[in-house]
Amino acid sequence: MIKELWDKGLAVRKDVLGAEYVERNVKAADDFSMPMQEYATEACWGWLWTRQFPRKTRSLVNLAMLSALNRPHEFKVHVKGALTNGCTREEIREVLLQVAVYCGVPAGVEAFRLAREAMAEYDQGKKSG
Amino acid sequence: MIKELWDKGLAVRKDVLGAEYVERNVKAADDFSMPMQEYATEACWGWLWTRQFPRKTRSLVNLAMLSALNRPHEFKVHVKGALTNGCTREEIREVLLQVAVYCGVPAGVEAFRLAREAMAEYDQGKKSG
Amino acid sequence: MIKELWDKGLAVRKDVLGAEYVERNVKAADDFSMPMQEYATEACWGWLWTRQFPRKTRSLVNLAMLSALNRPHEFKVHVKGALTNGCTREEIREVLLQVAVYCGVPAGVEAFRLAREAMAEYDQGKKSG
Amino acid sequence: MIKELWDKGLAVRKDVLGAEYVERNVKAADDFSMPMQEYATEACWGWLWTRQFPRKTRSLVNLAMLSALNRPHEFKVHVKGALTNGCTREEIREVLLQVAVYCGVPAGVEAFRLAREAMAEYDQGKKSG
Amino acid sequence: MIKELWDKGLAVRKDVLGAEYVERNVKAADDFSMPMQEYATEACWGWLWTRQFPRKTRSLVNLAMLSALNRPHEFKVHVKGALTNGCTREEIREVLLQVAVYCGVPAGVEAFRLAREAMAEYDQGKKSG
Amino acid sequence: MIKELWDKGLAVRKDVLGAEYVERNVKAADDFSMPMQEYATEACWGWLWTRQFPRKTRSLVNLAMLSALNRPHEFKVHVKGALTNGCTREEIREVLLQVAVYCGVPAGVEAFRLAREAMAEYDQGKKSG
């Protein structure tokens, strides 16, 4: 573990995905999966996400990539992250329409279905929070 | 919305996927997702599916592409659409075997599992309809 | 090698891709690559392509899958195979438009560019043949 | 062809990709490929790119998606489009680093190699223009 | 069916995936899906898996490919197969970290989540067996 | 830059890919692409490749993943790296046959074509070195 990257990464990760969600994930790690936690926290959050670039744009770019890569679980996590980072639903919509045109209609249809689920969960979390 | 494409598209979409299913989808759309409904209905159904080409072949080609693209939800929708368009189970089988050879055994195994689920749902729908 | 599958497969493969092209490929194989020749000839051509199904439809399905899979070299080989199997340019066009809608505009644009190259080579081969 | 979408789309497409490049493409189209020109111009440029959303962000999102989709030719076209739309090289760099983390190191390495080629061509075009 | 390949393939398949699991799958096959069983058993298990190569390495290579191909169901089946073939959890972990770096962080995160599920099911099966 | 990771990573990278090739790449980097060099060297080579795991197996796993990911340039680089790491041509062949079965025949055909090119270049380099 590279302590400095881990600390910086963990802070951004909690900002974007929520402290509780992140702590639950880290706590659930065991010897088998801990190096994955390290890599995600240090390389992705500690190195990439701390570079000079608007978080809102990072979020929109992520939603497009995760649709193209066909990773529904991470996609939903990052829809919520995008809302937390201040993306509007209109901005998210525009990116997902771009997915439909560039990655094809089935990718677009799925992105909208998952985004609506994630947004409902996000709103529910706020109400019950 | 381009009224003429929407109307033509909605008609074909209902023919292939079932009027009830399509109406439920359109009705469920909100401000966020309505433009996706428009794009799918106008570009995909109103423009592509109304072009001169046998619907049966469109369906078979779709099943192969949706397997390669790894989109299980849309794949199942289009297995039912293929049956509605008059594809036989033997024809669907041959396309899915082609998927297994060209996209790899795991893609083939998954396509057969999903196709059997979709066919069972289709038969159930006919019985209870 | 399973002699019966190899013989049946080689015959179909030559029918579809051209005897000269196939013989050149088989002759170029060495100890390293010969098992790949076996697998392609026996499983793909000897088993799949000899099953009861119109070769024209197999070709159209292949063009869609190879576009989705992003394999330009094999795609061009199978455009020529499709013409040999009696697919018209109109039928090929319709499948590639379907690629554009379902796999996205970039996949469609690339499929058309490659198809035109392959068709020009095919016509050239006929003239010079 | 839907005249209104075509006209609006052609204008944006020329703005982003350059009038000369687009005219050459449209002129090169024949009966076989013309419907693909129509679809790209009307659906992609006439419908999507005229919607309310910053062109700079559309460009950055596109670079990420085209990397994930592994479409090198279209990727290079859109690197030049991104520069035309006012994206800085620093912004493009940040998106490509995000590609490296989310789509994997090989996707990132390739994106940087292609981007540098495209940028050199873009600068060359400006000098010789 | 090619009897010799089927018999050899069925034996290896049972060794790796478990006799009960395989018999259940074969028994569940009907006219529609039986050719897929044949292809998987003969080409994949009877031809590939009986070639001279350590089963442990085949398993590790498979986990990487199934992650890249995004096939969660088959991935979990092969995590259990890897354990049966004698791969340690440390070896599996190293391959999945390689997935995270080469296929991207979301592919790695998903691979670890699925692997932990599969390992828990495997341990449970041993306890209750 | 994290000096310790960079130094360790650069050493392994040179071991596997050749000192001259790596130095040329690093030297060619400019402000735009240097962070990609950093990420590849530190995360991929400094972190992943220095973990406890046989380099030969890392190489074989990489060839399978790069085939599945469809990255021909990086694939060829890693065929040469695999030979340098002591993989035999028979071992590489077995992995590529596994690619053909699990990722589909076109992926296998391409992997063999590229591998033969890379092997010829590798042999040539040794002769002229």
Image: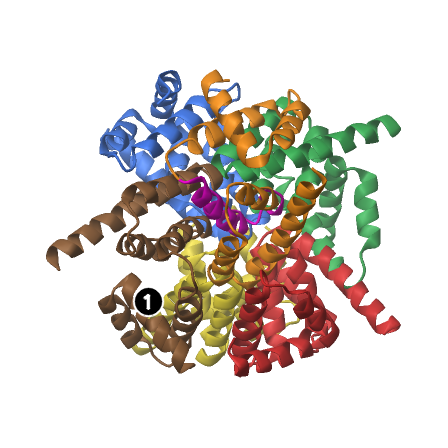
Chain colours: A orange, B red, C yellow, D brown, E green, F blue
> Horizontal and vertical percent for residue A55?
45, 40
> At label 1, which amino acid type do we have?
Arg
Quarter of the image containing the C terminus of chain A?
A: top right
Q: Which residue is drawn at 58% across and 82% down?
A: B8
Q: Which residue is drawn at 60% across and 52% down?
A: A115
Query: Which quadrant of the figure has residue F75?
Result: top left
Front residue of A115/F59: it is A115
Q: What stretch is highlighted in magenta?
A: A54-74
Q: From what the image shows, is residue B30 above or below residue E55?
A: below
Residue under pointer 1: D13
Q: Indicate left or right for E125 with C24 as reference.
A: right
Residue drawn at the location 78% of the way across and 37% of the way down: E18
In this rendered view, identify the residue nearer to me: A85 or B39: A85
Can residue C6 be seen in this snapshot? no
* Residue C23, picture quadrant: bottom left
Horizontal side of B36 relative to D91 (left or right) equals right
Task: Please report the residue visible at 69 percent of the width from the left and 72 percent of the height from the top.
Answer: B22
